[in-house]
Image: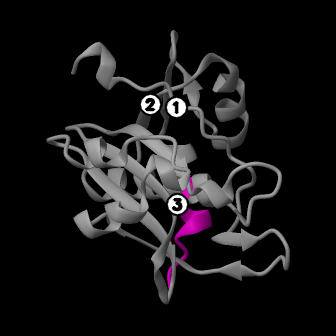
Amino acid sequence: MTKEDIYKLDFEIDTLTDSIRNTISGDSFKTEISLLTRSDLKTITKTKGWLFNWRNEFNQPGREVYKLTITNNPDVVQGLISFTVRTDHVYMFLLESAPFNIGKNKLYEGVPGNLVAYACKVSFQRGGEGFVSFESKTKLIDHYVNILGAYHFGGHLMVIDTIAAKRLVDKYFKPE
């Protein structure tokens, strides 16, 4: 991995919800997470307000890019996450809420928490015991420690351990 491949993540966890919640009505909506497709990329561009070049991320070998959508509304992407599964954990490269889910006038809250919980779930499923790591921007290190239960391992490295991962997975992925 080259230096330019390492992003320092700066997503803010607005609130940990059971799914995602409409900020106007307060209603919660069930979500689905599925692999991003090439055709999805038509609507996920900088001209449509997305901050990152998700087409480039989608084309990176060894990375998996997933989209969060509301159940029965698969065409509206609420957020995206990119990660790779390593032998002992999941490493998150990028996470971004849809442009309409950012800032004080966001439409839905809970998107970043939902995506991080998914990375933890994948880690459990693929033998990483829930461990997830990522690089954080300095100003958000304490935020991730307090909200996600992540550990700061020095520099910008953050790690979510098994206990914190289980808490997130249990919150967002309740058995049906």
Which residue is depicted at the point 48% across and 30% down?
159
Q: Give the range drawn in magenta.
A: 166-176
Q: Mark 2 points at which residue?
A: 134
Q: What residue type is labelled 3?
A: Val
Q: Name the residue under label 3.
A: 169
Question: From the viewer's perspective, is the residue at label 1 or at label 3 nearer?
Answer: 1
Residue 121 covered by magenta stretch: no
Residue 168 covered by magenta stretch: yes
Instruction: Please tell me in which quadrant of the rendered image residue 143 appears.
Output: top right
Q: Please report whichever mark, 1 or 3, sits nearer to the chain's N-terminal start.
A: 1
* Above or below, 101 relative to 134: below
Instruction: Give the image location of residue 61, x and y in percent.
Output: 14, 41
Q: Name the residue under label 1.
A: 9
Along the horizontal axis of the image, is 97 left or right of 13?
left
Which residue is depicted at the point 65% across and 80% down?
29
Q: Quadrant of the N terminus?
A: top left
Task: Say if mark 2 contacts mark 1, CB within 8 Å.
Answer: yes
Q: Which amino acid does label 2 sit on?
A: Phe
